[in-house]
Amino acid sequence: MWTFLGRGSWPTGLRGEGVGFCPVHQLEISDLITVVDPHSGHRLPVRRAEVIQQLRESGDERAARIVAELPTDRDGVLDPHAVDRLLISVHTELQRLSEELRIGERLVHLLGPLFTAIRETTGQPGPYRLVDVGCGLGYLVRRLATTKALGTDVELVGVDLDAALVGEADRLARAEGLSCRFVRGNAFDLPEAATVYVSTGVLHHFRGPALAEFFQAQAASPAHAFCHFDIAATRLAPIGAWIFHRARMRNPLGRHDGVVSARRAHSDETLLRAAAVPGIRALLYEPRGAANPFCTTLRPIIGVRPRLEAPFRQALGRDAHRMVGPEHLAGSIR
Ligand SMILES: C[S@@+](CC[C@H](N)C(=O)[O-])C[C@H]1O[C@@H](n2cnc3c(N)ncnc32)[C@H](O)[C@@H]1O
């Protein structure tokens, strides 16, 4: 749903680039109503009329009407507190979707064997560090902390550019006394290296060259692996997203952006091609054709250091056959 503001060696393709690549009706409102300075991390004022104009120019009158309802000050600048409250409420609804789609369990199904392979291969005692890029309200990290599913030698860190979301994630974790932490900022500017990067619902925001840059930067870091879940680009995805968001989300902005996200989802081919960067073995779990399109809503693109692939497959057991590399997809990928 949001804009990516990278810094340093990280993808800079962010706001302008992402939006520039989007055809008609592919602008997410939440990308437009929060803007953060990529260097200072400070929130920038957003003029409602400009957002409305941008949405109208893209032909999305419905989105323009949703934004027209948002409160502004006397100069027409969107009220940042109202925007924060709105986005927290939309993300709370998103958390419910993640629960229903069992994203936490599905992540653990892969990350458990992945950390087993890392422990075996590196021979290092830990601690290891999992970083959730664009953690939003931190559902995934909080769930991992509650269940301790990855073991006590894995430190759990959620990072998001959005101060309000990170603040709420932190508040919720403290209320439950969870052993995890949340940081506001660019996930790739952390002082400590991640062992594994993960994310949910983030990849489709990276458009054009920014997608490959996202993976290249992880390959250039000391991380051993990444596992990024995003909407599977099936023909059913946009209608499925419409039905699901209609049934499960109350907020018009959440409903709107949920459907646009599905339209912007990257194909299996695009993800495998972009993630196949030097130093990384790209693997797609449950590619199109190998999975039931009625059930596969989000599926991950995984990247591992090449020496990890065999132990990872072994730890995954029978399910390893659900995971394919670029060479397995029909002709188009090299
Ligand atoms: C659609 S939200 C997903 C939130 C959460 N993962 C979920 O599933 O509910 C995408 C989030 O990614 C954050 N984000 C984008 N690029 C980031 C980066 N480089 N570092 C940290 N957060 C980032 C945005 O601020 C936004 O909150």
Image: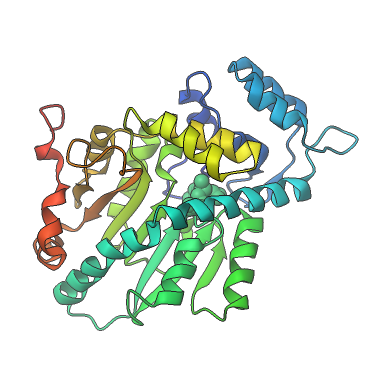
Coloring scheme used: rainbow
Q: Residue 198's image quarter?
A: bottom left
In the image, is 232 to the left or to the right of 204?
left
Q: Is residue 14 left or right of residue 64?
A: left
Q: In percent of the image, x 68 and y 24: which residue is there?
A: 64
Left or right? Give the position of 103 relative to 168.
left
Q: Vertically, is 106 above or below 44?
A: below
The reply to whether residue 184 is in sight is yes
Res 261 visible: no
Seen from this angle, which residue lies furthest right?
74
Left or right of residue 278: residue 107: right
From the top left corner, tell me how far across and down residue 206 is, in percent.
42, 38
Quadrant location of the C terminus in the rendered image: top left
Height in image: 229 above or below 210? below
Give the percent coordinates (x, y) of residue 24. 51, 18
Q: Residue at x 54, y 41 (%)?
A: 247
Which residue of the protein is positioned furthest toward the front in this rendering? 247
Whether residue 167 is situated above or below residue 65 in the rendered picture: below
Question: Where is residue 263 shown, x and y percent of the image?
Answer: 43, 29
